[in-house]
Amino acid sequence: TQTVSQSDAHVTVFEGDSVELRCNYSYGGSIYLSWYIQHHGRGLQFLLKYYSGNPVVQGVNGFEAEFSKSDSSFHLRKASVHWSDSAVYFCAVSYTGYQNFYFGKGTSLTVIP
Amino acid sequence: EAAVTQSPRNKVAVTGGKVTLSCNQTNNHNNMYWYRQDTGHGLRLIHYSYGAGSTEKGDIPDGYKASRPSQENFSLILELATPSQTSVYFCASGDGGQGRAETLYFGSGTRLTVL
């Protein structure tokens, strides 16, 4: 079974803190990984993706993620969060590059000003 | 301006009624998708399409039909709506193809309540 797991349903930090949102996937073959952000009442917006090359990928608004094949992980990080980063973050995995993206259940990030 | 537009934004339907959710994209993407979002489940794929005239079943297609009459438009149809289909529905277009990892572009969602 192909799955993606986000172990933290909720994360709360203060503005200026660093944050890491975790994502783990199952499957050992070719894989495409993405992170999306959803602000309250809005659709999802793309943050970044990995499919080959440098395992550390940069995204919008200072976010980055690191792919680890050995840990089956693709954790999202930001060095210094802003209150506007408060949102739900979804990790998505595809084993074909398109069509069947499997989304995690999301991590709700709350940034306290 | 929004490249993926869904209508209506909100819909209340009665059990057994027919519901059509519409999606229009101006990205000129071949791929389009319908997802539903429920608390505790994340997003689940209902139907998708590779282009005009094509529809494919996703992970949870039962009770839903899809129609892709043109590159721009992709509809989700509930012939006989049930309360279990109360959810938020998202349409997305995707720029994938030729082995390129796809980026999805989502609409703002349709909140459907079936009474």
Image (cartoon, rainbow, N blue to C red):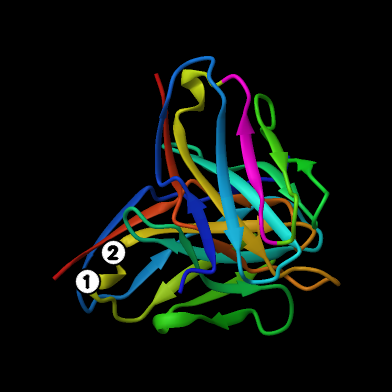
- What amino acid is found at the position of numbered circle 2 in the picture? Ser
Q: Chain of mark 1?
A: A
Compute the Cα span from label 1 to label 2: 6 Å
Residue B89: image x %, image y %?
A: 50, 43
Residue extending farthest top: B16
* Circle 1: element type: helix
| Left or right of A12 on screen, residue A113 | left
Residue A86: image x %, image y %?
A: 28, 64
The front one of A57 and A87 is A87
Residue tagged 1: A83
Quadrant of the frame with the C terminus of chain B: top left
**The quarter of the displayed image where residue B67 is located:** top right
Residue extending farthest front: B69
The front one of A63 and A41 is A41
Is any part of residue B86 visible from this angle? yes
**The quarter of the displayed image where residue B75 is located:** top right
| Left or right of B104 on screen, residue A63 | left
Quadrant of the frame with the N terminus of chain B: bottom left
Q: Residue at x 69, y 32 (%)?
A: B61
Magenta-span inclusion, residue B78:
yes
Q: Give the residues in magenta.
A: B72-80
Residue A24: image x %, image y %?
A: 58, 55
* Circle 2: element type: loop
Q: Residue at x 45, y 28 (%)?
A: B86
Residue tagged 2: A86
Instruction: Determine contact: label 1, label 2, CB under 8 Å.
Output: yes
